[in-house]
């Protein structure tokens, strides 16, 4: 009897502690998700705004049959002369509408996938081994692309058309739904997903690997900001180079309704590009510009995310 009387309060106390611990852990998890979403949103917005003029020029060449060369950079100058300085950022509002949720979802999903895979493989709180690291990045990119794809199509349409055709984002949605059907909003979705798997997978994998190697060989827990920029630039260079042909196919399919190209499947679009423009010149058109803007954008993105995470952790503690 005496033991039963003593065990009752003790058990109640332990149960209360378990509930309290679970509640604290749940709140911490929610804070971490919100922190990742906010950091990712800011990272995506800053990165894409910084390279928006180069991005617009790249898209214009991707969806045309003109040969890409260094003269393409003149497009920036002539656009500035004919349409004004702010026209270099035409379509950037649509980019922000897409990139802010895309980057927020991608970075937040990546943190969650890392946590889940780390728990599954027994690497909780440690750097993941190579294959799970690659898998986490690919899953994060696929999740973000699936949830925000129509906004990517709208951004591409606005980048290659004059102001008179589409006045704003909502106008693009309305015209597409009326004239081409709602299913057009997902035209080009498959090459996007197929392209984002190697792109996001290799980008996150490269960045996380370089940070891990830096920790191992430098003895410092955190890299300096300029080192993060370099790691991010390498990640962007590798990721975008690996997935670039599918990016060209995606843009052709997204803009088929306004550029005169017939709407076609992935395989047919690929064959058309190779037949008319050649495998290398067609499928890698604009890659040199991507080697300029990609490392800058990805470097800014990863660095901003990491620094925001560090700042928010300091503020919370």
Image: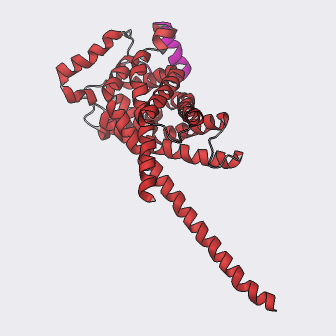
Look at the picture and state if 91 lies above or below 117.
Answer: above
Identity of the residue furthest to the bottom in this view: 1
Seen in the picture, residue 308 relative to 158 is either above or below; the reply is: below
Q: How many marks?
A: 0
| Foreground residue among 6 and 193 | 6
Q: How is the image coloured?
A: secondary structure
Residue pushed farthest right?
Answer: 1
Magenta highlight on residue 269: yes
Please identify the dominant SS of the magenta region: helix
**Residue at x 43% of width, y 37% of height:** 303
Residue 140 included in the magenta stretch of the image: no
Task: Indicate the position of residue 283 as horizontal and vertical percent values.
Answer: 49, 15
Q: Where is the N terminus found, in terms of image quarters?
A: bottom right
Residue 279: percent from the left, percent from the top? 52, 9
- Within the image, what quadrant is residue 93 found in? top left
Which image quadrant is residue 47 in?
top left
Residue 2 placement (x, y as % from top left): 80, 91
Q: Of residues 156 and 141, which is closer to you in this image?
A: 141
Residue 282: where, in percent of width, then height? 46, 12
| Residue drawn where x is 67% and y is 49% of the image | 119
**Farthest residue toward the front?**
219
- In the picture, measured across the screen, residue 117 lies left or right of residue 43, that is right
Q: Is residue 101 visible?
A: no
Q: Is residue 205 visible?
A: yes
Bounds of the magenta segment: 262-276
In this orientation, which residue lies closer to the viewer: 160 or 216? 216
Which residue lies at the image location 53% right of the left edge and 29% below the top edge? 199
Q: Residue 56's quadrant in the figure?
A: top left
């Amino acid at each position: 009897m005496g033991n039963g009387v003593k065990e009752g309060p003790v058990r109640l106390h332990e149960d209360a502690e378990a509930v309290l611990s679970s509640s604290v852990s749940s709140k911490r998890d929610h804070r971490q998700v919100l922190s990742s979403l906010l950091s990712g949103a800011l990272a995506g917005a800053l990165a894409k705004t910084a390279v928006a003029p180069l991005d617009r020029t790249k898209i214009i060449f991707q969806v045309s049959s003109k040969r890409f060369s260094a003269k393409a950079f003149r497009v920036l100058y002539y656009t500035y002369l004919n349409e004004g300085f702010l026209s270099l950022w035409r379509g950037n509002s649509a980019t922000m509408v897409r990139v802010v949720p895309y980057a927020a979802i991608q970075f937040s999903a990546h943190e969650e996938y890392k946590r889940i895979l780390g728990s599954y493989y027994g690497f909780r709180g440690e750097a993941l081994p190579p294959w799970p690291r690659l898998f986490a990045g690919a899953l994060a990119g696929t999740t973000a692309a699936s949830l925000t794809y129509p906004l990517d199509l709208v951004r591409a349409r606005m980048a290659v058309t004059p102001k008179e055709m589409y006045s704003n984002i909502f106008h693009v949605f309305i015209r597409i739904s009326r004239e081409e059907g709602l299913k057009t909003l997902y035209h080009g979705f498959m090459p996007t997903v197929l392209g984002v798997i190697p792109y996001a997978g290799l980008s996150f994998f490269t960045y996380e690997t370089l940070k891990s190697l830096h920790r191992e060989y430098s003895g410092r827990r955190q890299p300096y900001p300029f080192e993060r920029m370099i790691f991010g630039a390498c990640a962007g260079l590798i990721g975008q180079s690996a997935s670039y042909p599918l990016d060209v196919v995606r843009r052709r399919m997204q803009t088929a309704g306004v550029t005169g190209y017939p709407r076609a499947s992935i395989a047919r679009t690929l064959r058309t590009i190779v037949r008319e423009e050649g495998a290398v010149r067609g499928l890698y058109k604009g890659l040199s510009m991507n080697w300029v803007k990609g490392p800058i954008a990805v470097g800014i993105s990863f660095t901003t995310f990491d620094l925001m995470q560090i700042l928010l952790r300091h503020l919370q503690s």
